Image (cartoon, grey):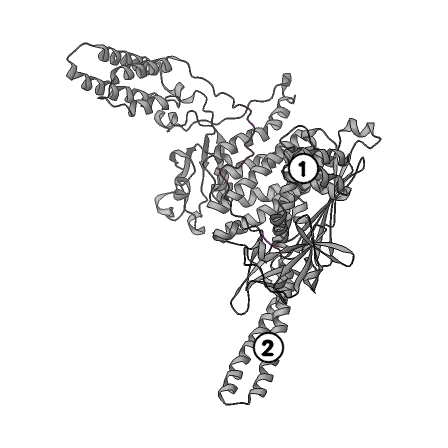
Amino acid sequence: MNPLLEQFLTEGRSLLEEASLALLALEAAPADKNHLAALFRAVHTIKGASGLFEIAPFTKAVHAGEDLLDAVREGDVPFTPDLADMLLMLLDQVSDWLDQLEAHQELADGADASADRLAAKLRQPLTEDSDTRTDTPGGAAPPPATGVWPDDMATEDKQRCAGEPECWRIDYTPDANAFYSGDDPLLTVMNTPGLRWVGTVAPEVWPEPGRMDPFEARLGFAAVACADEVALRAHFLYVEDQVQLTRLSTDATARSEIDGDTLALARDLIGSQRRLLAAQGAEQTAPARIAVARRMLIAIARRCDTGALQDIRASLTGLDPEAPEAETRLDGLAEALGTQLAQPAAPNEPQPDLEPDLGPVEPKTESRKAISIRVDADRIDMLMNLAGELIVAKNALPFLARRAEQGVPSKTLAREIKSQHDVINRIADELQTAVMKVRMVPVGTVFGRFNRLVRDLSRKLDKRIRLVVEGEDTEADKSVVEELADPMVHLIRNAVDHGLETVADRRASGKSDEGTIRLKAYQQDDSVIIEVSDDGRGIDLDRVRAKALEKGLVDADTLSAMADATALQLVMAPGLSTKEQISDLSGRGVGMDVVASMVRRIGGTISLNSTAGQGTTVRIALPLSMAVQRLMMIEVDGGYYGVSVDAVVESQRLPRDRIHRHRDNETVLLRQRMIPLLHLRDLFGCPPDTSKRDINLMVVEVDGNEVGLVVDRFHAGVDAIVKPMEGLLRHSECFSGTALLGDGSVLLALNLAEVIRCRWT
């Protein structure tokens, strides 16, 4: 990718985020000029940077948004929620275009149409405002100034401009010293976007032949181009003081250039061709008559084309004279051509007020887009220092090899190797810590986008909602932050739709009209905690129990013995929803299930607390890093597996007579706690252990519940980089990934939540 384009994409997304935050802040406080200034600066910078690339639709749409914001700054247009909706549409479209540029280095084919619709909608408030002004007598707005067509421009060239949305006259008078500054006026004008005609303009007075400098630019240019104004001004950016643009009116222009005699002759010729087609004759002469009439009709359509005959011309060109019923089809086209020429020129019809397509212009790829990281310079310096130390430590290894060749006693050599290993081990640990710091990003990069989500949902549901964000500076590994976005969207949608009441319901329950959703992030030990809470109606536990029983998620006996806190977690079961009606926001019973699955997949835990009438809090605990994990190694039938150390409660060796059976399940009583047992040999389909030796028990905690894993052996803990499963094993949900050990063997990391679910479901 072009480095300049890559930089534009990075800065564009950063400016887009700034613009979104400023726009939402401005909507909350319309009188705050600082928010308006910040929004205008961001949009203006995006527009200016886009002019460096061949993305005219992008620039056109953003330019329209800039003009609208400038009118708001000047007080000509009031800032309203509807205006904010239009600007948010612009930001959404710009975001889609940035994705297209990143994927293909160009915009999709439909970008021009989308830009035209969006620009027209953004400029509509400016037009409405100008219509209401009374600067001219009678209160009528002055008609737009239009230029005069160049005298030397032929009628055929003018006809080519008919029907174009924008047509401009360009008067270009190059500076006399243009050649000395590296300009090429002729090349510049011939490369004009949408060029339809160009002619030269001689100076009013030529210098005397003896005093003429052949290296001075004397000729000027007059040109006509049908292109967007932004594209034209960008093309003449470096000579803008030498160029004058004047808009030309294309309404009935080409038609007016076709005199009445020409139109009358064309209609007579069409009539004669229709009579030729209707003439009786030998069947073998029909293709020749059809071919002659077809050529004549094409010539008439080309001579009289005002932009409205393109379809007829295309049909005539594609007609096969020897095809069946060609004579009938050609006569129909001749009749349509004559009818079209008999009608007066129709003015340009106003474009319908279409909403810009907010969806992606083209299908998005499934590959996850990497996010950019802004790294503090001190952290980069730390990496450089550690890299220098590592090089020094590496250079010591050849000396150790040479001493080994020289026959240095093994004990002495072993001491030196261990000493050097200690140095390398220290550098590796510090390097790992430094790299982890580089990968740390604030969770606020995810929290920032939820202001827009809450704002849109509140308007859609007609609820008054305030979003409070705390701890957005809390840092976590970038991979954790990337995975955090989708679960948070589900949680916020549930809080808005399920949790918060309407204004009428809140008043009836004695609450304020405005509901509150609170996002809170903080670090606890080696985890980052995310809490999503609301002050809404809370969760009806009786309804949860009834729905769980209705869906068959749990039997009546188990449900009756279930504590309230445990029953509340049933909300995260697949297919359970307490909402009676399904909407496009919720009600299908998949939201919380998806959240729980995604959180567990990345090694986190989720819990739910709710008080009827007061609100609900969802608490997510995620590891600070997913890159390097501390795993406890276990062995089962000769295979090595890893369990996250954070989930391990304790490890025990117990006699087999301590095992008790309850309803076909094995349990063990450990410190007054009844721990259910799970034999990993049985789960993995390994042969049963027939020995009478004691059992090795690892007690793990998953979602607040303790389970005992029966394994063959325990091994030391390791720091491992866990890679996601690929190929045929990528759907094995019981494993969170693989890690490579020092001896080259592969360690399978267990996804404990799925392991337990597979055993008891």
Nearest to the observer: residue 160 or residue 473? 473
Amino acid at the residue labelled 2: His
Can you say which quadrant of the picture contains the C terminus? top right
- Give coordinates of residue 290: x percent, y percent: 22, 18
Local SS, label 2: helix
Q: Which residues are magenta?
A: 352-374
Residue 500 in the figure: left or right of residue 145: right
Residue 104 in the figure: left or right of residue 662: left
Residue 498 in the figure: left or right of residue 181: right
Instruction: Please tell me in which quadrant of the rendered image residue 264 appears.
Output: top left
Tell me, yes or no, if residue 54 can be seen here: yes
Check disc 2 and report the residue beneath it: 421
Instruction: Please tell me in which quadrant of the rendered image residue 196 appears.
Output: top left
Residue found at x 51% / y 31%: 116
Local SS, label 1: helix
The disc label shown at residue 493, or none: 1
